[in-house]
Image (cartoon, rainbow, N blue to C red):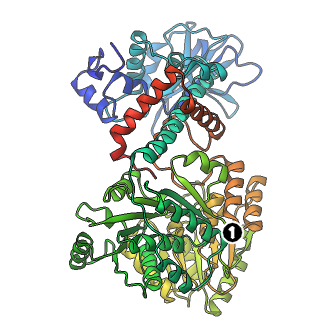
Amino acid sequence: MNIYSSIRDLRGVGPKTAETLEKCCIFSIIDLLLYFPRDYEMISACDSLQGDKNYGKVIIKCEVVRIEKDIRTKSGKVLTTIVFSDGNSEFKGKWFNQPYIKNYYRLNKEYTLMGKLQEFRGEIILSNPTLVKEKVNISTEEKIIPKYPLRSGITNNLMIKLISQVLQEVEIEENLPMWIINKYKLCSLDTAMRIIHSPKSSEELHEASKRLKFQELFTYSLKILMLKDYLNKNKNGISFKIHEELKMLKEQLPYALTKAQSRVVRQILVDQKKGIPMNRLVQGDVGSGKTIVALISIFNVIKNGYQGVMMAPTEILATQHYLEAEKLFKDFNINIRLLCGSTTVKNKEKIKQGLKDGEIDLVIGTHALIEDDVEFMNLGMVITDEQHRFGVAQRSRLSNKGKNIDTLVMTATPIPRTLSLYLYGDLDVSIIDELPPGRQIIDTYYINKAGKDRVYNFALEEIKKGRQVYVVCPLVEENEELKLSSVENLYSELKEKYFQDTEIEILHGKMSPKLKDEIMNRFKRGETKIIVSTTVIEVGINVPNATLMIIENAERFGLAQLHQLRGRVGRGKHKSYCILIADVKNDIIRRRMEIMKSSNDGFFIAEQDLKIRGSGEIFGVRQHGESSLILSDVIDDIELLKLANLEAKRLIESNIENDIKVKEEILRKIEQSSRFICFN
């Protein structure tokens, strides 16, 4: 057997089991070995209940003292109880609806049990224990059971059995350079793979995990660095000239660009002049003016005789960009169209034909842009806004509608500067870290729930002045356990208690896109004064007349997300406010609220969030498949990523024979798959 053999070659894997394994993307032995546990169940060896109570999952040797009579509980369940002794203390084993369990036990006989140990009403209880038949050294052993991601038809025991069978028959070759293994005192790949699937101790598991995470991050860094180098050397992009009308466009801008905006525009124009495809990420804080930078960039491409496309995650945001582009380009003879899900069938056909014929210069839209029948005559540049909202496959489909085109991705999610260097090694990163003149500094306050009346009375005062208000809460439905406000209950409470005579609407993610857009458009037109919403209003919506953001249960949000929500106000000429209603029950929550109160700098806030909460909410929802990482996390394992990235750079510069072989193998894979890879 070798690691590339079919999974069907394993003993115990029939056609039905093989089919189920293949649904988990397990086709070969190597796939099985790389199907790592999602978690581990730690079971402590317990030789005595005296002294420190070793509560939790335990293995314990004991003797049956007595078997009690079954009783029926109020809920109708049958409760079976057997009293055991470990030689010093007695405890009770309890089973629900398993009266036959008594047949497996005899008085004064010794057994080894495994179960959850807990104290209840002064008694020590072992809940639903199972018999351990294999020999266990109770005085020293810690049992760790791997827990695998499962699908219907696949059990955890089957996965353990199959992987154990494989590990007995294969030896895994080392594939990291020995100088790296020796430098960081890493265990061998073969050892790490055996331990990750069958650890004997927490210490052993930590060492195996460190080795495999380092390997994963090293390979990740190496691929990114070599990919960038490959693109620069092997892809002939479009060399755009700096068009003379750019100067005229700049003179007609309604306001002067900030130094940060001007710097980023220069970086993009330099990229456009090069004969290789641009691949740039623009990071900008909420309201920093990323859209104008993107439109200036695409203007130059259009004036060079090429088409441009800009994709946004929602119709509201796409429409906003479309109106801004029309206003900015009105004197420059540029044909712009909007293509969204709600565009009529007749207009869609006209737009698609216009793009194919080259009559349309710029199309702005949503996911509708990636449909197969959207074709371009001469596409030169693609811009995706809020890139983390689109899957890799979606962005790739859009980029592949042109040949070696320039790509610009934008995000308002602030990523700590140091982190972005490692996360986006394959992208050139530009940061707009300055707000345009006239942008309001938003006064931020936090209060406990007891002060809600003051907050909503203040909201009424703002509405009397002709302003509008956002109210955000974290859940759509009531969660009794957490006792959080649901958007429906909060809407009813606010309507009844504070805003009987005020236009108020509700908005949440379970609504259809069409209904969400209708509600937001009424709010934009000023017909609705208050919108009670979940975080669906987090990104991109521009309502200059909205001056107050109230966030309920603010302690439930990450700092970066709170900052994004706060950015929905302060977009007009009026003074704006953000009030965080929070359950400030500990110092960490207080510290986080104080950070929000004291700073409007998204990058500083992201750094603080990273320090306080680890990965926190920097990226909102982590995209599946975004980095192809299985064990490691680029944020939680940032220190390991830095080391792995450093060694990847050294290997690229190395002339050692084995290092050259590693590089050649990765390059071969890149050449095979580059057409299908989305490089942003």
Image location (x, y in percent) of residue 490: 56, 72
**Tag count:** 1
The quarter of the displayed image where residue 380 is located:
bottom left
The quarter of the displayed image where residue 518 is located:
bottom left
| Residue 487 appears in view | yes
Residue at 41%, 69% (x, y): give it.
Answer: 301
Front residue of 71 and 106: 106
What residue did someone put label 1 on? Answer: 580
The amino acid pointed to by label 1 is Leu
Looking at the image, residue 602 sits to the left or right of residue 155; the answer is right
Classify 242 as above or below 439. above
Image location (x, y in percent) of residue 247: 53, 80
**Which residue of the protein is positioned furthest toward the bottom in this rendering?**
465
Mark 1 residue element: strand
Classify 275 as above or below 452. above
Q: Quadrant of the N terminus?
A: top left
Front residue of 199 and 293: 293
